[in-house]
Amino acid sequence: MFPLRSWPGLASACLLAVVVAVVVTAILALILRLIGRRRQWPALLIRRSRVPFRLFLLVIVLWIAVAVTLPPDTTAAWRSGIHHAFLILAIATGVWFAAALVIFVEDLGLDRYRLDVPDNRYARRVRTQVLILRRLTVVAAVVIGLGAILLTFPALQAAGASLLASAGIVGIIAGVAAQSSLANLFAGIQLAFSDAIRIDDVVVVEGQWGTIEEITLTYVVVHVWDDRRLVLPSTYFTTKAFENWTRQHSELLGSVEFDLDWRVSTGGMRAELNRVLADTDLWDKRTGILQVTDAVGGWVRVRVLVTAKDAPTLFDLRCLVRERLIDWMQRYSPGSLPRQRVELAERPEALERPPRARSEEEGRLFSGSPDGEQRAQQFTDAIPVIREPDGEPVAIDPDDVPPTTKESR
């Protein structure tokens, strides 16, 4: 039998430590699975903390085994180096395990607030805040872990006083250099707790309609309606105006407008609108009216107001109402369709003649002028014939003809 503080004893102790770690992990997993038959949180805990817990437990039991069985002939430098390496590993895995437990607690809070319900405003607010806190947790865990690891080095501990003395100057330089990043960082925290925007909010930014998909400490991702992603800095939502359609509630009111002819039957359109709304599940039965909002400029403007439970449903409802009412007008009320009317006014006959015809008549004797018409009248008058009482004609001397008649001939 080999002694405990020897190299074979060290190898046996390390092997035993691995077996102990595996057995302890299996026992805890079995207990959590038994509890998970009635509860849901054990499965979530296993998923979040299984890997960091196993690594942390393995580092601890190996450290204990090495400390107990390390041969005495090992130099002090090696002994110190091994213990320092295990200390760094223990800090890293311990911080990872602690962060996993915090994230597990946050997941428990998220599971209580579901987004697949009609009125999910409070749930979206809580989810936004928890996701921001999760990112802060990860950042804080990394900073604390790195700080703890660096403090294990004696050289850094000795330099701590000088670093603290120059912290003011370094802070000023870092603040000026990272002014934009720090502004976005604080803007992200402000957005999370000011309730200005939340995950799954419907917004209109930069002329784009979309939903808030992700909120980080430095930027916000907007999922645009055509599946594009609009990435904006967090300071955008704290310095510029934007539209939030679901800040108080998700129900919305939308309009459908038509420019129609004056012969439109608003009563028939209203009856058709009621039939369309009664046959669809998109309408939430709050508002469904038809109004004539304008009647000038040759058109009658008809506006339909409808409501739905959220923005996507409202868009589909507006499209449905527009399509059905257009189909109804084409089938049963064609007089309602918009028309352009043109009134033709009659002009004097002289102005209606083509320019070429007028120019040809100006060169003739009997043109359309007043003098020409008078000459035509004189020319067409009958020459008087003088008869005797017995009916015989009498010869007329040309000199006896009136001057106007001679001029006409």
Image (cartoon, rainbow, N blue to C red):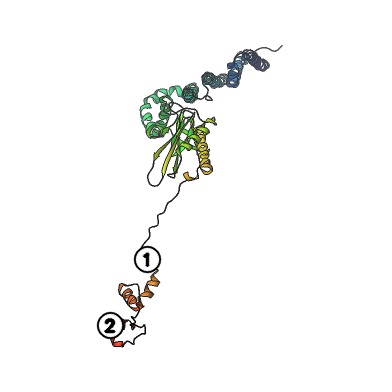
Residue 47: x and y in percent read 60, 21
In the rendered image, which quarter is residue 186 located in?
Answer: top left
The relative height of residue 3 versus residue 176 in the rendered view (above or below) is: above
Q: Helix, strand, or loop for circle 2?
A: helix
Helix, strand or loop at mark 1: helix
Crowding around mark 1 (Cα neighbors within 10 Å: few <14, some 14 to 19, many 20+) is few
* Contact flag, marks 1 and 2 (Cβ < 8 Å): no
Give whichever of discs 1 and 2 has the lower sequence position: 1
Q: Nearer the viewer, residue 192 or 101?
A: 192
Quadrant (top left/top right/bottom left/bottom right) for the N terminus: top right
Percent of width and height locating residue 183: 39, 31
Residue 291 is situated, as x and y percent measured from the top left of the image, at 42, 36
The C terminus is located in which quarter?
bottom left
Query: In front here: 71 or 402?
Result: 402
On the picture, is 65 further left or further right than 113? right
Label 1 amino acid?
Glu
Judging by the rendered image, the residue that carries numbered circle 2 is 403
Q: Residue pushed farthest right? A: 1
**Number of the label disc, if any, that sits on residue 349:** 1
Crowd tier of the residue under label 2, counting other residues whose Cα lies within 10 Å: few below 14, some 14–19, many 20 or above: few
The residues bearing labels 1 and 2 have C-alpha atoms spaced at a distance of: 34 Å
Q: Please identify, in this view, whether the residue under mark 1 or under mark 2 is nearer the observer.
A: 2
Residue displayed at 53% across by 22% down = 114
Q: Is residue 36 visible?
A: yes
x, y percent for residue 231: 47, 36
Which of 334 and 231 lies nearest the eye of the viewer? Answer: 334
Is residue 325 left or right of 14 when viewed as pictured?
Answer: left
